[in-house]
Amino acid sequence: MGQNVIFMLLAMVYLLINIVTSLNSSTDEYALLAFKSQITSDPNKILAKNWSQGTSFCNWIGITCGRRHQRVRELNLADMGLGGTVAKEIGELSHLRSLIISNNNFHGFIPNEIGKLSQLQEIEMQYNELTGSIPPTFEFLENLLKLSISHNGLAGNIPNRIFNLTSLIEISFGRNNLSGSLPMDICFNLPKLERLRISENQMSGSIPPSLGACMNLKLLSLSYNNFAGSIPMEIGKLSKLQILYLGGNNLIGNIPNEIGNLSAIKYLNFGPNSLSGM
Ligand SMILES: *[C@@H]1O[C@H](CO)[C@@H](O)[C@H](O)[C@H]1NC(C)=O
Ligand SMILES: *[C@@H]1O[C@H](CO)[C@@H](O)[C@H](O)[C@H]1NC(C)=O
Ligand SMILES: *[C@@H]1O[C@H](CO)[C@@H](O)[C@H](O)[C@H]1NC(C)=O
Ligand SMILES: *[C@@H]1O[C@H](CO)[C@@H](O)[C@H](O)[C@H]1NC(C)=O
Ligand SMILES: *[C@@H]1O[C@H](CO)[C@@H](O)[C@H](O)[C@H]1NC(C)=O
């Protein structure tokens, strides 16, 4: 009886080791080919000609592999006129740090599977035609430094837990169709955040005073949304702030005196709004 249990455990460990070791570079090639298969427009035939199975995928255009292992570290296909949807198999590139597909014509949803890429530091998907919502699974990307998905057709709420990714330096959500309000504790866990762009969406509610806790903020753009209420005086604490855009909202009341303490400010735009006072 006892021996059987030990045997079963050993068999399970063996199976697990096998599963883990099979997640190797052949998975990466399979994932990249799946990605390629969903590209329906490739006007310069970049992938069609170059991503061929006869050659190592580490030499394919747009791919950078790690030095030691033949695993994809970077996928950079910016500005290639590519069209199609983003294959969910991208979530199998488990060593990926940088995912850049900006300035193309990708449409459809952002796959939830991207949330499995725990080493991911950079997502750049701006200037495409992506729709659906921001995947809630992004909350698992604990190493994320830059999340740029501006200039798409994304709608729905921003998953609040994204603002709990403490390593973030840049959040760019501008010019989409995002709605809902910002969490009141938005900056409690973003000590490194330097750029926050949410302009040109359908966001509502008030501007959270906790923004004053994003001490490294250099750029804050919330313009052209439906933000209401007053400008929180806490914004005046952002001593590194260089750009502050709040125009095109429904803000009321005085401009707080504390704003006058923003000694690093270079660009400031509050109009149009319904502000009053001096
Ligand atoms: C990758 O996994 C496949 C399938 O499990 C195996 O055939 C191949 O030898 C492995 N390659 C490396 C480099 O480990
Ligand atoms: C793909 O492009 C790379 C970089 O330009 C080049 O080194 C490689 O030979 C190309 N491969 C094929 C099959 O065209
Ligand atoms: C944005 O949402 C509105 C309704 O909320 C809709 O009428 C409009 O077409 C959407 N725009 C885009 C670019 O998806
Ligand atoms: C961050 O996570 C904590 C604990 O789960 C939660 O209480 C808090 O509301 C989260 N903050 C944001 C901005 O979502
Ligand atoms: C501006 O900063 C100075 C120096 O830190 C401080 O004494 C003053 O109270 C601040 N003014 C406002 C209106 O916050």
Image: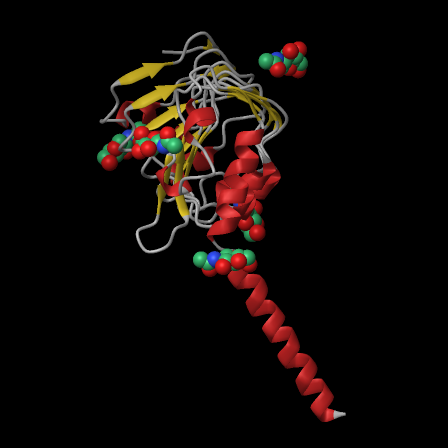
Which colour style is shown? secondary structure
Q: Nearer the viewer, residue 271 or 37?
A: 37
Can residue 90 be seen here? The reply is yes
**Quadrant of the image for the N terminus?**
bottom right
**Quadrant of the image for the C terminus?**
top left
Furthest-left residue in view?
263
Furthest-right residue in view?
1
Q: Is residue 154 above or below residue 89?
A: above
Q: Nearer the viewer, residue 256 or 110?
A: 110
Residue 58: percent from the left, percent from the top?
Answer: 37, 42
Can residue 138 be seen here? The reply is no
Which image quadrant is residue 17 in?
A: bottom right
The residue drawn where x is 61% and y is 39% is: 112
Q: Quadrant of ligand 2?
A: top left
Horizontal side of 234 relative to 31 (left or right) equals left
Residue 22: percent from the left, percent from the top?
Answer: 54, 59
Which image quadrant is residue 10 in?
A: bottom right
Q: Nearer the viewer, residue 226 or 234?
A: 226
Horizontal side of 98 relative to 208 (left or right) equals left
The residue drawn where x is 44% and y is 13% is: 247
The residue drawn where x is 42% and y is 16% is: 44
Which image quadrant is residue 14 in?
A: bottom right
Total labels drawn:
0
Furthest-front residue in view?
54
Horizontal side of 38 relative to 6 (left or right) equals left
Furthest-top residue in view?
272
Residue 257: percent from the left, percent from the top?
Answer: 33, 23
Q: Is residue 272 above or below residue 261?
A: above
The residue drawn where x is 41% and y is 29% is: 50
Q: Nearer the viewer, residue 143 or 239?
A: 143
Residue 28: percent from the left, percent from the top?
Answer: 49, 46
